[in-house]
Image (cartoon, rainbow, N blue to C red):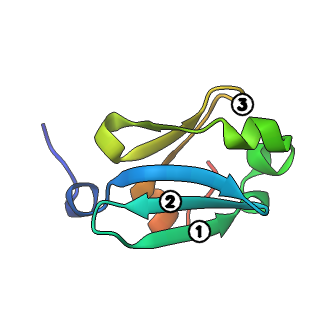
Amino acid sequence: MKYMVAELLFKATKVWYENGRICILLSDKKEIRFPAELNDKLKKASPDQLKNIEIICDGTGLHWPDLDEDLSITGIIEGRYSA
């Protein structure tokens, strides 16, 4: 299986929604945040839908089951918040 270096370095260990932002704690203890409004599906979602976030793919992705939306940690770090 092939991986990008960023996928091996940056994995989410915790994720939550707070004050309009998606917050991610990485395995190296760094924290990143981005405004939910940067993503087309997230900006239309209710706070309850935004709070329902799952860490997927061994920490390399995030999934919002209520919204059928997935984002990669690498994409978020690179500033890609929507498809």
Q: In this rendering, would 13 be left or right of 17?
A: left
Distance from the alpha carbon under mark 1 to that under mark 3: 19 Å
> In this picture, is 18 found above or below 2?
below
Q: Look at label 1 and name its amino acid.
A: Arg
The residue lying at 34 percent from left, 45 percent from top is: 59
The residue to which callout 2 is attached is: 24
> How dense is the environment of label 1, judged by Cα within 10 Å: few (below 14), some, or many (20 and up)?
some
User: For the residue labelled by badge 3, is the local secondary structure a helix, a strand or a loop?
Assistant: loop
- Along the viewing direction, whichever of 41 and 22 lies nearer the viewer: 22
Q: Which quadrant of the view contains residue 21?
A: bottom right
Q: Is residue 15 above or below residue 31?
A: above
Where, by quadrant of the figure, is residue 22 drawn? bottom right
Q: Which residue is mark 3?
A: 67
Across and down, in percent, residue 55 comes to 45, 39
Q: Earlier in the sequence, mark 1 or mark 2?
A: 2
Left/right placement of residue 44 relative to residue 51 reads: right
Position of residue 60 relative to residue 76, above or below, is: above
Q: Point out residue 5 in the picture as x, y percentages from the top left corner.
A: 20, 62
Q: At x 79% / y 37%, what residue is drawn?
A: 48
Q: Nearer the viewer, mark 2 or mark 3?
A: 2
Position of residue 30 measured from the top left corner of the image (x, y, whole percent):
38, 73
Asked if marks 1 and 2 touch (Cβ < 8 Å), the reply is yes
- Which of the numbered marks, if any, corresponds to residue 33? 1
Q: Quadrant of residue 80?
A: bottom right
Q: Secondary structure at mark 1?
A: strand
Farthest residue to the left: give it: 1
Which sits in the foreground, 82 or 14? 14
Which quarter of the figure is the N terminus placed in? top left
Other residues around mark 2 within 10 Å, as few (<14) / some (14–19) / many (≥20) = many
Amino acid type at circle 3 is: Leu
